[in-house]
Image: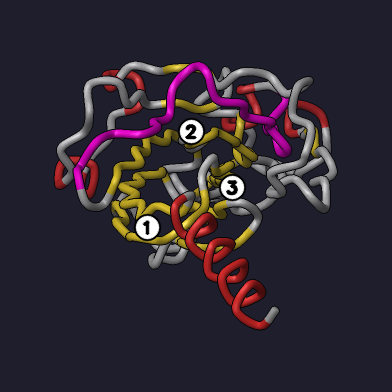
Amino acid sequence: MRFILAAATALTACAAQAGTRDITADVWVDNWFSLSANGEAVLEDSVSITTERSFNAETATFSVELPAVIAIEAKDFKENDSGLEYIGTNRQQMGDGGMIAQFMDAVSGETLAVTDADMKCLVVQHAPIEPSCADEANPVAGEGACGFVATDIPADWTSPDFDDSDWPAATVHSAADVGPKDGYDEITWDDSAKLVWGESLTQDNTLLCRLTISE
């Protein structure tokens, strides 16, 4: 009986190991992100979102059982809920975001998943309501053109079992519109990897995005 139990345990361990892959992720976000795989945090932008021109890329390798749901929280910098940056200076403006990522087999280099129009992205902070907010001498978050829309973040949104079927698809944006720079240029991106965000690069400030790495 002991032998049978030991054999069964070994077979279970082998089966689990067979479904586990080492994944290398390349991620570039303007300005900041955190990333989970099957609900477990595996990577976070090492540069603070408050750092001016924080356009770095991150590369990391992690192990995960496939299929795996990748959940990315992406943020463009804003000083407050008005959505503006450089408030009170001659550079006062709406910032603009953008994100691109690819996930490869760490051994073979095969691209397994990328950011594209098939992924889901829920905007949870949208501001300002009107672009004219950026021209106000004393912009106040929540007032007039500087109103904002905030959505509660679901507690279990990184879980592979979370139902994102009613979330909108990510919007693909051109490199000309996003203007990726710095760390972006240090990565060789797969042709299938796309720059994505919400519909508005300037007004969508915080997004929750999900994609799946298949077996």
Mark 1 = which residue?
52
Residue sitting at the far bottom: 2
Query: In the image, residue 141 lies at what x, y percent?
Result: 76, 43
Q: Are marks 3 and 2 in contact (CB under 8 Å)?
A: no
Closer to us: 148 or 123: 123
Task: Kindly identify the amino acid type of the residue bearing the numbered disc 1.
Answer: Glu
Whole-number angstrom distance, CA of label 1 to CA of label 2: 36 Å
Quadrant housing residue 20: bottom left
Query: Magenta stretch: residue 112 in it?
Result: yes
> How packed is label 1: few (under 14 Cα within 10 Å), some, or many (20 or more)?
few
Instruction: Point out the tag, 1 or 2, that comes first from the N-terminus.
Output: 1
Element assignment for label 2 = loop
Mark 2 = which residue?
214
> How packed is label 2: few (under 14 Cα within 10 Å), some, or many (20 or more)?
few
Query: In the image, residue 36 lies at what x, y percent?
Result: 56, 54
Give the extent of the magenta segment.
108-129
Whole-number angstrom distance, CA of label 1 to CA of label 3: 19 Å
